[in-house]
Image (cartoon, grey):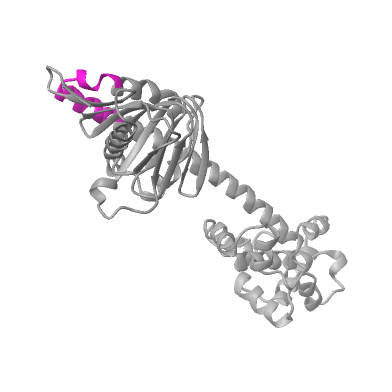
Amino acid sequence: MTTGTTARGSSRTTIHAGPLVSAREQRTDWRHTLSHALGGVGISSQGPSSSGSVSTAALGVLRVVRAEADGMTVRRSARPEDTDRGDRLVVSLLESGAGRIEQDGRTASLETHDVFLYDTFRPVRLDLTRPFRVKSLVLPREALRLHEDDVCRITAVPFGPETSIGALLPPLVTRLVDDAELFSAYTGELMARNAVDLLGVLADEWLRRGRDEAADTNRALLLRIQGFIDEQLSDPELSPARIAHAHHISLRYLHKLFQAEGTTVGRWVLRRRLEACRRDLLHRQNRGLTIAAVAHLHGFASAAHFSRSFRAFYGVSPSEWRATQAQALSSRPGRGDCADEQGRPPQGSADAEAGRP
């Protein structure tokens, strides 16, 4: 082990493991140094050989780490009791090698030049299964000022060169790790602060893009569900549970989609049924049908329930609506058929003035 101090006052600790050191001493020093630098996670070497090196240095709020070896596993199986040792985010650049990382329900393959993050406070496993070189920035989790749910969304995600994080961070990580001891204390503080700010901006941009994509996906799904409801309005057994099952989503998720639109599944179905009934009450081909028959066509099992719902929604009963609109249409020659087909209330009606649908 060597510890060097520069004229500027910063220091770097380096562990070299090679043929002149016993295998047991190599593995002990290697694991202990890297584990301490990464916040107390478990470190194990892979295979009979443990040759390699670890180099660490403090840089403001950061700790920079450079490690290369024949292979290793980083693991934490449970949250640490000592949060001062475990509450860290690790931002790593895999300069060479390949591996796999698991955290927060995700498993991702890692390739050379990928940038990836993991949280040492929660269960994690990182396997680098062949000779590798990795450079890392270790920072307190609160430095990014991200909610824990957002932190969970960026862990175990490989950011390749085609992403903003994967394109902008590697040069910065490399410079900070390689030259940390060359910076004065003041410059080191500024560099660390700027690195954390840049990481925060890039993480926020990635998270916002993910939220926008999720919102687009939700809107498309909601449109499909609404179309399905329109097709199934005649079924009196149409229910939120059946709608959710037909779209392979949970009932809770279905309710969440409609809550985002300021309504509920049940109210949406009722509204669409009432709109369809109101329209059909005016169609010429339905003039011979009773109000109860029209209601039944669109999934109302009870004429009384339909009448109550219609009055609550439009302010008049179905029979009053039908009589009033038929009289209004008959008094407007040449336009009755068109209005008949559209089912719209004529100008001046109570619904038109109230702005009701």
Instruction: Specify the farthest residue to the bottom.
Output: 304
Q: Is residue 113 above or below residue 157?
A: above
Q: Position of residue 88 (x, y in %)?
A: 30, 42
Frontmost residue, 2 versus 106:
2
Residue 188 visible in this rendered orientation of the protein:
yes
Relative placement, left or right, of 310 versus 184 is right
Residue at 85%, 74% (x, y): give it.
Answer: 289
The picture places residue 357, in percent across and down from the top left corner, at 63, 61
What is the total number of numbered labels drawn onto the structure image? 0
188 lies left or right of 268: left
Residue at coordinates 34% horizontally, 30% vertically from top-left? 136
| Residue stretch rendered in magenta on the structure | 178-195
Residue 239, given in percent of the width and then of the height, sits at 67, 69
- Give x and y (percent) for residue 9: 12, 22
125 displayed left or right of 179: right
In terms of image quadrants, where is residue 186? top left
Indicate whether residue 185 is drawn in magenta: yes
Viewer-proximal residue, 32 or 218? 32
Asked if residue 139 lies in the magenta stretch, the reply is: no
Q: Quadrant of residue 57?
A: top left
Q: Looking at the image, can residue 344 be seen? A: no
Which quarter of the rendering shows the N terminus?
A: top left
Q: Nearer the viewer, residue 144 or 107?
A: 107
The image quarter containing residue 94 is top left
